Image (cartoon, rainbow, N blue to C red):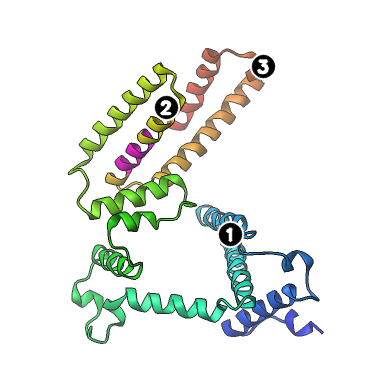
Amino acid sequence: MYDPLRKSSESEIEAMRRLTEIIRILRSPQGCPWDREQTHQSLIRGMIEEAYEVVEAIETENTENLKEELGDVLLQVVMHAQIAEESGSFSLRDVADAVSEKMLRRHPHVFDKKTAETPQNCGISVDNVYELWENVKQGEKNASSETESMKKIPRHLPALLRSEKIQAKARRAGFDWDDVSEAFLKVREELLELEEACEQQDKEHMRHEAGDLLFAAVNVTRFLDIDPEEALNLTSERFIRRFSQVEDQARRQGRSLNDMSLAEMDELWEIAKSKEQL
């Protein structure tokens, strides 16, 4: 009965038809109980996790894993489209057409009939394209102000990335410093305010000032053209690597970290740190 679905596809169209048919069967009364009960809401966590797993595959340069993880993201897209089609909201074709139309609208320098020259001949740079994209996007979102544009930034984004996007929109409105030196001063100011809040033992005030400090730090990375999310992840990985060396050194001494003083552990940490600098 399902033998045709077991055959590999010979074209992209056949591959998508095969996948959508499999999802339709899984969602049918004759399909899988788990798949049938899924909703847009129940799949949120899965979509987020799959996206992060794609990033992991890219960063580790594992092309085979990347192929698999992209497939998992595509599965999420097809599942959401199938759920929507069952309720009469939209279909996978609507999803594909909508994003195709968006690409046409946001690339007038490529697809506009009035543009006879190539982007290279027109002298369009990456920065020009980014500004054009943002202008078209803001018009599509019907944002009457930069504030409205900020509010449309998804709250589910990683906090560092979300804050960077908010700051970029403030910059578009001219609400920004001239150079990074002023951003550094803001970090120092926020650090002092956090220290004062700690002295007052006011938990809510501390949370407020801690957020201000992180926001200010993101401002510095934005000026330096550094991805704050990537920078923090690199630091986290470096911490794990060094901490592992600290544990290994303690184990070789026949000791447990729980039995060591902070000064002793810090000494091992400095040894691990020096090895990375060699």
Residues in magenta, as a range: 213-221
Label of residue 255 in the image: 3
Rendering quarter of residue 15: bottom right
Rendering quarter of residue 18: bottom right
Residue 214 visible within the image: yes
Q: Are marks 3 and 2 in contact (CB under 8 Å)?
A: no
Q: Position of residue 31 (x, y in %)?
A: 78, 73
Q: Position of residue 145 (x, y in %)?
A: 27, 59
Q: Which residue is mark 1?
A: 47
Which of 158/180 is in front? 158
Question: Upstream in the sequence, badge 1 or badge 3?
Answer: 1
Q: Which residue is mark 2?
A: 206
- The structure residue drawn at horizontal position 20% and vertical position 43%, both measured from the top left corner, is 177
Q: Is residue 39 magenta?
A: no
- Work out how far the residue at label 1 is from the one at label 3, CA to CA, in angstroms: 43 Å
Q: Is residue 92 left or right of residue 200?
A: right
Q: Are marks 1 and 2 in contact (CB under 8 Å)?
A: no
Which of 177/238 is in front? 177
- Work out how far the residue at label 1 is from the one at label 2, CA to CA, in angstroms: 33 Å
> Residue flagged by tag 2: what amino acid is it?
Met
Residue 278 visible within the image: no
> Residue flagged by tag 1: what amino acid is it?
Met
> Residue flagged by tag 3: what amino acid is it?
Arg
- The structure residue drawn at horizontal position 34% and vertical position 46%, both measured from the top left corner, is 226
Q: Residues within 10 Å of mark 1 (few under 14, many from 20)?
A: some
Establish if 207 lies above or below 264: below
Question: Upstream in the sequence, badge 3 or badge 2?
Answer: 2
